[in-house]
Image: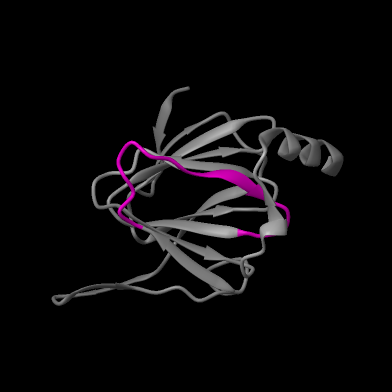
Amino acid sequence: MSEHLSNLDAGHRDTPVKAGSVKLIELPVITDPRGDLTFVEGGRHLPFDIRRVYYLYNVPVDSSRGGHAHRNLEQVIFALSGSFRVIIDDGQSRSEYVLRNPRQGLYVNRLIWREMDMFSQGAVCMVLASQAYDEADYYRNYDDFLKAVAEAS
């Protein structure tokens, strides 16, 4: 796979995942001499209303997170500080994104497997989700995920 740098700041390596399943979202910024302010409004900047916010931090640089897909939940993943890689898999192809711009999020639709790794020291990952936590919404076994993708096709 060759590495592409989008016109935004996320590094992107890919064998394209199906259209509409994953996309980069850039949030607005207000800049003045005191610093930058970025904001997000569910339903306006995101394709869903925000029902849950969580963040990952103090992740050891050699650790990985994710390793699952969701039946119904949609997410936008941000690197608020530092950087990390997000590997996206739709059951047929894979894409990789390196997130490092706090204004830029990676939208991940339902039935998309995601893994995160290569966390820089001090990285902070924030996730905005379309639903509250529900363990029944998770595919944690890759083979179960592949079966669900095949059934949805």
Q: Nearer the viewer, residue 66 or 7?
A: 66
Q: Is residue 46 above or below residue 60?
A: below
* Side of 96 where 137 appears, left or right: right
Residue drawn where x is 72% and y is 33% of the image: 143
Image quadrant in which you'd find residue 47: bottom right
60 or 71, nearer to the observer: 60
SS assignment for the magenta stretch, majority: loop
In reply to whether residue 90 is colored magenta, the answer given is no
Coloring basis for residues: one colour
Residue lying at 55% horizontally and 50% vertically, measured from the top left = 23
Q: At 49% from the left edge and 69% from the top edge, which residue is drawn?
A: 53
State whether residue 13 is above or below residue 58.
Answer: above
Furthest-left residue in this view: 33
If the image is split into quadrants, where does the C terminus sit? top right
**Splitting the image into 4 quarters, where does residue 148 fall?**
top right
Residue 59 is a magenta residue: yes
Range covered by the magenta-colored residues: 57-74
Residue 75 pos. (x, y %) = 57, 59
Q: Is residue 20 visible?
A: no
Image location of residue 72, percent across then percent down: 72, 58
Q: Residue furthest front?
A: 135
- The percent position of residue 129, horizontal first and vertical second, equals 57, 65
Residue 104 vertical position relative to residue 67 in the rendered view, above or below: below
